[in-house]
Amino acid sequence: MATKSKKKTAAKRKSAPAKPKASKPVKAAKAGKRTHAAGTDPKRVAAILAKLDEAYPNATCELKHENTFQLLIATILSAQCTDVRVNQVTETLFKKYPDAKAFAYGTPSELELEIRPTGFFRNKTKSVMGASKAILEKFGGQVPRTMEEILTLAGVARKTGNVVLGTAYGIASGVVVDTHVLRLSNRLDLTRNEDPKKVEQDLMKIIPREKWIQFSHQLIWHGRRVCHARKPKCVECNMESLCYAKDKTV
């Protein structure tokens, strides 16, 4: 009888539902890794914008141009090239090629020689000539005023579109994200993305639309003058107290 009762007890134990396992405690964040939320608190963003206004009230596009078309061409040439170099090239370039017709129906090999110092000159020649032809044939000789239309031009992506629409037409279609804006937006913890398209979307969510154009120019100026890539001049930065970047020099 004792043997049978033991068997019954064992059977009950097997049929009983298993007790849930205790959940493991969440491990603490690794040492040295940021655990705070992105620095996009409206008050902090407003403080950053105020500091930029204080430091660069007159910031604007530094590509030299006399009209919207010249700005478009200069911006296409500025890809992977400094504005200083582009300005050196366009000083003589725009005298030889005064309008869209001159670029569209010029000799590719001659244009390549003219813009060679800006780098990637073969691709840029195709873009400049292609964009010029489209402006003449599709847009009546005028640079388009919408992002949708301007993106159909050869060599034009959102960065170029934002530069032209914002600087020439005062149209805030987005935020210019060049290498400086990309670097500084991450240093200031306004975004944690590296892809320019995602960075632009992040900035458009936290920067007031009426500040999109000026904000881009100001951040670019700050990147060129103070917040350098290799060794930022944090001692000279009026936003130092708001910044907690890992590579600060103070």
Image: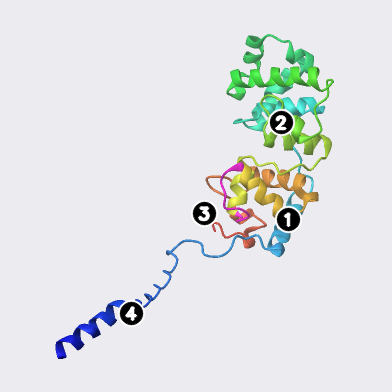
Disc number lying in front (3 or 2): 2
Q: Residue at x 57, y 53 (%)?
A: 192
Disc number lying in front (4 or 2): 4
Q: Quadrant of residue 144?
A: top right
- Name the image quarter holding the N terminus: bottom left
x, y percent for residue 126: 64, 18
Q: Residue at x 66, y 26 (%)?
A: 155
Q: Which class describes the residues within 10 Å of circle 1: few (<14), some (14-19), or many (20+)?
A: many
What segment is highlighted magenta in the picture? 188-196
Give whichever of discs 3 and 4 has the lower sequence position.
Answer: 4
Query: Tags 3 and 4 in contact by the CB under 8 Å rule?
Result: no
Classify 135 as above or below 18: above
Q: Which residue is mark 4?
A: 16
x, y percent for residue 44: 68, 62
Pick the front one: 30 or 250: 30
Pick the front one: 45 or 246: 45
From mark 1 to mark 3, how far is it between C-alphas? 21 Å
Q: Quadrant of residue 170?
A: top right
Q: Which residue is mark 2?
A: 151
Which disc number belongs to residue 247?
Answer: 3
Which disc number belongs to residue 49?
Answer: 1
Q: Residue at x 67, y 57 (%)?
A: 238
Q: Could you tell me how many numbered marks the image carries?
A: 4
